[in-house]
Amino acid sequence: MIKNDLELQATLERIQHFYRIVGHLRKTETNPANYKASAGGFLAEIARMNLEVREYLSLHPSEFEKEEELVEA
């Protein structure tokens, strides 16, 4: 779970890096089955990270602090 804006920025950068990897695979992999096998893990990780970003951004900072207090309790 993303806990602050610094972690948000790092996650967004990682998502972009994975998109670049998948884009490179699309250009260089000639076999569709190999492409899907290679890209699948990156695409799943992108989806997971996007969910974390949405969850973090859906909370107002004051709500995030309350949620952290519940987790710590």
Image (cartoon, rainbow, N blue to C red):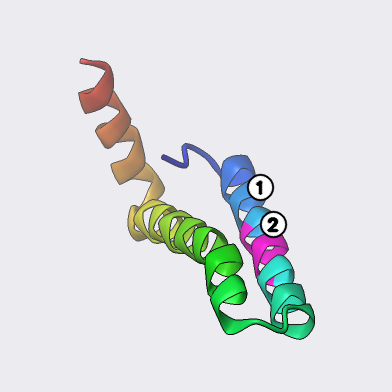
Residue at screen point 38% across, 59% down? 51
Classify mark 2: helix, strand or loop: helix
Indicate which disc residue 10 carries.
1
Farthest residue toward the top? 73
Residue 35 at what x, y percent from top left? 61, 75
Indicate which disc residue 13 carries.
2
Circle 2/circle 1 CB separation < 8 Å: yes
Residue at screen point 31% across, 29% down? 68
Residue 62 at what x, y percent from top left? 34, 43
Residue 24 as seen in the image, left or right of residue 16: right
Real-space CA distance between mark 2 and mark 1, rounded to the nearest whole angstrom: 5 Å
Residue at screen point 66% across, 71% down? 22
Indicate which disc residue 69 carries.
none
Q: In which quarter of the image is residue 55?
A: bottom left
Magenta includes 17? yes
What are the residue bounds of the magenta stretch? 15-19
Residue at screen point 69% across, 57% down? 13
So how many labels did they put on this image? 2
Residue 42 as seen in the image, left or right of residue 60: right
Q: Quadrant of residue 44?
A: bottom left
Along the viewing direction, whichever of 55 and 37 lies nearer the viewer: 37
Classify mark 1: helix, strand or loop: helix
Placement of 32 over or under 58, stated as above or below: below
Residue 12 at what x, y percent from top left? 62, 58
Label 2 is placed on what type of residue?
A: Glu
